Image: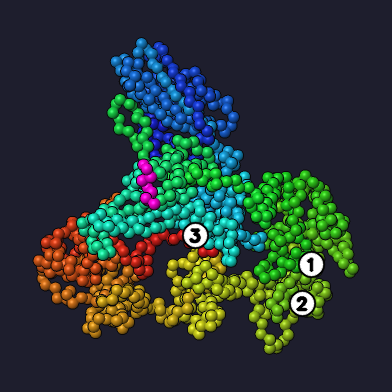
Amino acid sequence: MTMMTPPPLEPEEDEMLVPHQELVAADAAQPMEVVAQTEAASTAESQPAEDPQTSRFTWTIENFTRINAKKHYSDAFVVGGRVLIFPKGNNVDHFSMYLDVADSANLPYGWSRYAQFSLAVVNQIQQKYTIRKDTQHQFNARESDWGFTSFMPLSELYDPSRGYLVDDTVVVEAEVAVRKMVDYWTYDSKKETGYVGLKNQGATCYMNSLLQTLYHIPYFRKAVYHMPTTENDMPSGSIPLALQSLFYKLQYSDNSVATKELTKSFGWDTYDSFMQHDVQELNRVLCEKLEDKMKVTNLRTVVEGTIEKLFEGHHINYIECINVDYKSNRKESFYDLQLDVKGCCDVYASFDKYVEVERLEGDNKYHAENHGLQDAKKGVLFLDFPPVLQLQLKRFEYDYMRDTMVKINDRYEFPLQLDLDRDDGKYLAPDADRSIRNLYALHRYKFDDERVTKEDTKKALEEQYGGEEELPQINPGFNNAPFKFTKYSNAYMLVYIRESDKDKIMCNVDEKDIAEHLRVRLKKEQEEKEHKKKEKAEAHLYTIIKVARDENLKEQIGKDIYFDLVDHEKVRSFRIQKQLPFTTFKEEVAKEYGIPVQFQRFWLWAKRQNHTYRPNRPLSPHEETQSVGQLREVSNKAHNAELKLFLEVELGPDLRPLPPPEKSKEDILLFFKLYNPEKEELCFVGRLFVKALGKPSEILTKLNEMAGFEIKFEPNVMCEHIDKKATFRASQLEDGDIICFQKSPIPDSDTQMRYPDVPSYLEYVHNRQVVHFRLLEKPKDDDFSLELSKLHTYDDVVERVARQLGVDDPAKIRLTSHNCYSQQPKPQPIRYRGVEHLLDMLIHYNQTSDILYYEVLDIPLPELQGLKTLKVAFHHATKDEVVIHSIRLPKNSTIADVINDLKTKVELSSPSAELRLLEVFYHKIYKIFPLHEKIENINDQYWTLRAEEIPEEEKNLGPNDRLIHVYHFMKDPLQNQIQNFGDPFYLAIREGETLAEVKERIQKKLQVPDEEFCKWKFAFISMNRPDYLQDSDVVSARFQRRDVYGAWEQYLGLEHADTAPKRAYTANQNRHTYEKPVRIYN
């Protein structure tokens, strides 16, 4: 199986591919450079599904010069194809020739044919000068011909001495391979290949390739199915169950499969799904997790050890002395192998390089125990290979000059059959088990996320080798330079299965391998999915009728929604065929609710300008005789599939339904909600018909009955004040309006209520916001939640947070807003009173979040904002240690203030020691900060700030002495580039001092043992070009300039291997190119 990166569109050869166009104006000649974009045959959009059948056609055109027609066609010769020529050129001074679909006008709508073809004008004197051009095209009704407007100059064609026109005859040849095109709108991966693809979440193509790879190892799939899970597990919280579910769907689903459940089980959020990662890193992390999950405490499972059995191999690292009897061996295991692509032509060349013997001699001798420095051989040999061999091709490498990862598109071949026993087992260690035949087979299918297509052998191999592709020469024999382009589609992961283990690895996996609870769960999911799919397919035949009742209006009054009568998403829905009469639907309602048809009255809802819905009018008798579909069209201007209705049912004293009362134009249906300011509750209590000319005071008795207590009508507490002497019509009340009322407040009461009346309460509800607070250091975990108001001021919010946390001073709370897109905290915190209201804290562009991050500071935020905090790495003068100190000073402070503050916190070698502050980036020193420089604009997030004692030798430099930069470096042998590492430093060199003398001081300063230091090389480096020095060279002679910008690029380089452990504080040295490591959290 090959895993491939998708190719970008490549520019095609100039001039070559244009559909023929007859230009109206004679003087508007078509230029030779006219290019129409073609679809390369290797892209997914033009991927042929089967091998083509090739047809060859020779067309002998007699009396060529007597052809008067502008264009001339051959007979049809392949699937309706024919050659079209312009003997005098298609408005150019060149012979024009195309391949044309003769029957295009008679083909069905939407037809397309894909063809690779070549056209040629034969040289009848010398065959080798025949002009032949090749191309490919997807023919359709819009582009039914394709070819070459400027095939060859007319002057050459009509010159008899050239051999193309002989006895007034021209011979044209065509070779055409017509392929069946894959229509990816209707393409069925399962039907065509037996497999389905995986959906891409944003940047998860690397993960999809790995998952498909693992799925197509049946032994591994069977082991995953047998991992212990229970029916109580949830896929989003269990990696084994999520992977079982994914594999089950890949095996039994007919459509592409989503991976969101799996990534949720990893603990990933949307940000992780859009972060590109390394497939090898994910492979290792996932296998480690699965290895742990396959082990159950106090229980040995049947799948324990599967990862090792499948993927684990062993090699031995050895160092063998040449002149003495000493050998050092170290056995190591591997789950995959990283093979070099750069400088290797194929997999075998990479293995040759992997086991290549390195000579340790000269300055690079090996220090053998009890033998001192010795010439030696160093290398790697394999003890055993695993049944499933995973090869990670190093298609990406770090470019030190550009400070980024670059892709290697070199041609790199890999065989269908890989023999690692070749050449008498040259890859194997002497004590390797040679009884096992290490012959491996490659398995191939092309997985392009959701699509799976069959690949013929040539396509799977040749197109994934990478390298350059050369287009055929336009005019062979005329010394044209060939046109080449880089192939960006190439394999980066190869999986080989050992032939002797093939029957075991490629075992049968069926439903009996899948736990019963998993089969039941997934079949139920599949049935629900199929049911929804069927409903969707038949949706045009049905209308969804949503019926709201009084009971729904009572339920609506809850925690979140107060400003409408009902939530239509929560009411009972009926799926009714459109052609059924509405009376049939009423019978369905009678069965559902036990309300006879004659007692039902349905009202249509109307959307008002304030986006609320209210019952607007009852259905007329005529409307009730119509079909459901007709009624929906009449009532629904938005033309969606839903019909919203309110069911009015009148109940008598015995709670039995009564016939609905007559409704005239003078009757208004009003809905009533009662507010209790003590409990801060608003509830629906009923509805009434009132007369348009009636007055609010007339319904007092009925309201009393609804509320269950004696009340006096107080119109001034209504949301919109109503004149109690005015009629309902004069107050502009209409059907569906809501009237809120409450009990009269007790005069001179001592009870203080937060929201004493309906307007204040509804204002509170409208602006209420539950905010989830998270500690900034733990941005994934909710710490606590608070119910706040969007109108709360900055001070209100921090005061509530401080009270929740038990912090005495709210000013010590610092908040940070949430980025809704990355699902991370914003990089900059909210400044003290930097926003007016809570809503300003929650809005991110056009989205509103409900998350805030908090910190508890040791000093008040206003005070902190007047300070500058710098992280300074202090390097001790005599101890090999680095300590990070946070220096907090007023922003107008200077470097001298930083140094004075630092002196109080660090251990100095002597009380009189002087300090300096350096700016370090990528293991180079860019600056010594002057003592008078202000600290306000120093960026310690990008640069590393390093403090150190000034050595005594640097304090009294002579006029000809030099203070030079000294950096550690390694050379990349493939790219011949320099990579710096370690801690850079300054060194004072005296006039006339030789390298031998300088080396002695450097060794003493760095405390490097003799056996190690003798391997080091020294070079003067300028602009990344090393000039290696001899012991007798005078070092100061190389460093002529002092105190110039760019001095950091001239330095004394110490070349040696990087063996020091990486310090944590250097993590910010490359934040701008930081790639988030792959983590699986659960």
462 lies above or below 780? above
Residue at point 37%, 31% (across, down): 472
Identity of the amino acid at label 1?
Answer: Arg
Closer mark to the observer between disc 3 and disc 2: 3
Which residue is denoted by mark 2 in the rendering? 713
**What distance separates the C-alpha of mark 1 from that of mark 2?**
16 Å
- Which element carries disc 1, helix, strand or loop? strand
Sequence-wise, the earlier of marks 1 and 2 is 1
Which label's residue is closer to the chain start, 1 or 3?
Answer: 3
Q: Percent from the top left, x then y, of residue 947?
A: 28, 74
Relative image position of residue 1012 (x, y in whole percent): 25, 64
| Residue 600 visible in the snapshot | yes
**Residue 789 painted magenta:** no
Q: Which residue is mark 3?
A: 288
* Label 2 crowd (10 A; few <14 / some 14-19 / many >=20): many
Above/below status of 595 relative to 760:
above
Dot 3 or dot 2: first in sequence order is: 3
